[in-house]
Image (tube, rainbow, N blue to C red):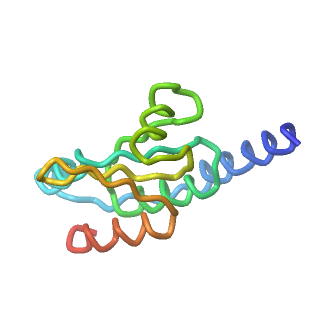
Amino acid sequence: MAVIRWILGRIILLLNFLFSPSSPKRAPEAQQALDEQTASLALYQFEACPFCVKVRRAMKRAGLNIETRDAKKDENHREALLQGGGRVKVPCLRIENDNGDVEWMYESNDIISYLNNRFAKEI
């Protein structure tokens, strides 16, 4: 079963590479302002997870530079996900609000919807 998952993961990554969406072109000032807004976000993910790929593709289509943290390969990120979010499930978006509160959002569709709504005017 692990071999099949590994093969399917590589196929997903290959297709994602071959058919990667393009990011919108923005003025450098506009992109920098957007990058400052996304600095408080981090996506916990596994590289070959299809739902994580779905979220990363949505981020790329919107031109959002959000830090990705691999919770499979990096034990520190895995532990942070477990401690903060309560479970090791990906994708998970860590949202640090202006007041310092941290939210953990699971489910790829919820994450994509949140990003589209929050950054609608920039997309």
Q: In the shown orientation, is residue 39 left or right of residue 104?
A: left
Horizontally, is 71 left or right of 35 in the view?
right
Q: In this view, does 7 lie above or below 16?
A: above
Relative image position of residue 16 (x, y in whole percent): 61, 52
The residue sitting at 18% across, 53% down in the picture is 37
Farthest-out residue, top = 75
Mark count: 0
Estimate the x, y position of residue 28 in percent, counting from the top left.
Answer: 16, 50
Residue at (84% x, 38% y) in the render: 2
Q: Which of 66 and 31 is in front in this view?
A: 66
Residue visible at 23% across and 45% down?
39
Q: Point out residue 61 in the picture as x, y percentages from the top left corner.
A: 41, 62
Q: Looking at this view, is 30 or 91 the one in front?
A: 91
Residue 122 to residue 37: above or below: below
Residue sitting nearer the eye, 12 or 52: 52
Is residue 66 shown left or right of residue 5?
A: left
Instruction: Give the side of residue 92 with respect to residue 123, left or right.
Output: right
How far from the left and from the top, in percent, is residue 10?
Answer: 73, 42
* Quarter of the rendering occupied by the N terminus: top right
Q: In which quarter of the image is the C terminus?
A: bottom left
